[in-house]
Image: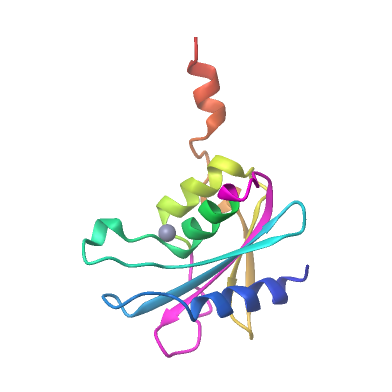
Amino acid sequence: MKDEELIRLADEARKNAYAPYSGYTVGAALLASDGSVTVGCNVENASYGATVCAERVAFSRAVADGKHEFLAIAVVGGRCGQPAETRFHPCGICRQVMREFCRDEFRVLVGNGEEIVCHTLGELLPAGFSSDAMKETRP
Ligand SMILES: [Zn+2]
């Protein structure tokens, strides 16, 4: 799948974002190794701590569908009703969730229809804590 198509799917999902408090809408499209794509959008809550980011919604939905191997995620965000920003990046919690299932080479696409920037998870979360560390501590 082309990067542009994954960004487009993320932008489509962004339309479903529930963001009455921040007014900031985000969409994500997660490409699994089997070629399937799972989308997510941010879902805010009056109890702010219960808010879930678009990326984590996509990962949770994909895992619930039995998927554990992923190639890339596109993330698109911006003010509600405005075009997506070109340099929107996943928050730290989402980067950690990506680390649970993905290696350094996992691709993180940010941008919009005009500009796409590709990072790797290794760039966004260097020396991240992973399940490998937990394996080393198990008896
Ligand atoms: Zn996040």
Q: Is residue 25 above or below residue 90?
A: below
Please provide percent x and percent y for residue 100. Answer: 54, 41
Q: Is residue 133 above or below residue 70?
A: above
Depth check: give the residue in front, 73 or 85.
73
Is residue 65 shown in magenta? yes
**Left or right for 33, reference 67:** right
Please provide percent x and percent y for residue 38. Answer: 62, 62
Q: Which residues are magenta?
A: 63-89
Q: Residue at x 54, y 49 (%)?
A: 98
Q: Residue at x 39, y 85 (%)?
A: 80
Q: Residue at x 64, y 79 (%)?
A: 8
Q: Is residue 102 above or below residue 35?
A: above
Please provide percent x and percent y for residue 76. Answer: 53, 74
Ligand 1 is located in which of the four quadrants?
bottom left
Residue 3 found in image quarter: bottom right
Q: Quadrant of the N terminus?
A: bottom right
Depth check: give the residue in front, 120 or 20.
20
Toward the left, the furthest residue is 47
